Image: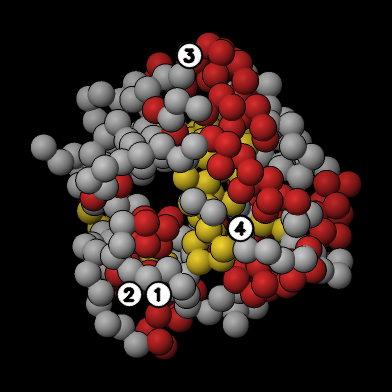
Amino acid sequence: MASYFDRVFKPCYREYLQVIPGKKTIGGCFKLLWNLIKPNALTYPDLVCVLTTHCSLKCKHCNNLIPCYKEPYHVPADEIISDINTVLSHTDICVKLALLGGEPFVYPEIGKVIDAFKDHPKVMCLDFATNATVIPNDEILDKIASAKNPKIIISDYGVSTQKVKEFAEVCRKKGIFCEVCEDKTWRLAGGTECRNKDRDKLIKEYDSCYSSRYCRTLLNGKIYTCARAASLVDMGYMDGAHDSFDIRKERTDKEFRKEMREFLTIDYAEACNYCDHDKKIAIPAGEQLP
Ligand code: SF4
């Protein structure tokens, strides 16, 4: 098992102090501290939720394998809301709840999901990662703006259909905190075949990956070790038994918290057997398939 301090405690403070917007207070720091150290505490630095596998771009090297979906789909909002509520009912604090796709703003029920969590007392920040090809309508933007602590991150790949400046300007006018990520390099994750790495290598790779701390991903009732793991299992490229936590399984609150803490400190992810991040091959971000 990895250490709770390294996988949960430190990432929670990093997210709170450096990543989420909003005023930071001594009281807020102490509240987070208490919810990290009290008996049976369960606090997430980052919970990522996949709303849809539809996307408005077709990135050749998408880490989450979205262009590999032959039949992309939207996850029903009622299921998403029920699953997140289940997780939050056993949770003390979720520092950041990230709504992700594919592209989250092509998801037709996004307003319903925002309404469900925009004022949730256990969620410190509602976050959206977008490619800025689709600017949501006023109604959706107003819902986001009225959330307790919203953040929109725009990934700017320099693709002609992206409306980065326009989207950022709309956010500014609505008072929504917006960050434009102009990083033009990705790390190649490669194809969906198994690399047959040994356990020691998997432990090392998972531990050195950002995702082992900041990208536990909820899809269809299960939380996965990372977003790539969720897609790999969803499309049948690997078995998810090791890399997932079934939140729909019957458990008491105490059991849920204990088993989830074990999952958050898991020592390796089987998904790393289907990923080349360790090779550190730099590639242009957002290169499009024809
Ligand atoms: S598969 Fe492993 S190395 Fe690749 S993104 Fe997921 S956790 Fe990181």
Instruction: In the rendered structure, find residue 137 and report the number of the disc placed on it.
Output: 3
Quick one: quadrant of the N terminus?
bottom right
- The reply to whether discs 3 and 1 touch (Cβ–Cβ < 8 Å) is no
Residue under label 4:
248
Q: Which is nearer the eye, 87 or 189?
A: 87
What amino acid does circle 1 point to? Glu
Residue under label 1:
270
Other-residue count near label 3 (Cα within 10 Å), few / some / many at <14 / 14–19 / ≥20 = few
Residue under label 2:
273
Point out the tag, 3 or 1, that comes first from the N-terminus: 3
- The reply to whether discs 2 and 1 touch (Cβ–Cβ < 8 Å) is yes
Determine whether the residue tagged by mark 1 lies in a helix, strand or loop: helix
Residue with the most extreme left position? 290
Query: Disc 1 versus disc 4: distance between alpha carbons?
Result: 22 Å
Residue 208 is at least partly visible in this image: no
- The reply to whether discs 2 and 3 touch (Cβ–Cβ < 8 Å) is no
Q: x, y percentage for residue 196? A: 27, 82
Is disc 2's CB within 8 Å of ligand 1? Answer: yes
Is disc 4's CB within 8 Å of ligand 1? Answer: no
What amino acid does circle 4 point to? Arg
Point out the tag, 4 or 3, that comes first from the N-terminus: 3
- Residue at (42, 19) in percent of width and height: 135
Q: x, y percentage for residue 107? A: 43, 30
Point out the tag, 2 or 3, that comes first from the N-terminus: 3
Query: Disc 2 versus disc 3: distance between alpha carbons?
Result: 41 Å
Quadrant in the rendering for residue 113: top right
Other-residue count near label 4 (Cα within 10 Å), few / some / many at <14 / 14–19 / ≥20 = few
Point out the tag, 1 or 4, that comes first from the N-terminus: 4
Is disc 1's CB within 8 Å of ligand 1? Answer: no
Determine whether the residue tagged by mark 2 lies in a helix, strand or loop: helix
What amino acid does circle 3 point to? Asn
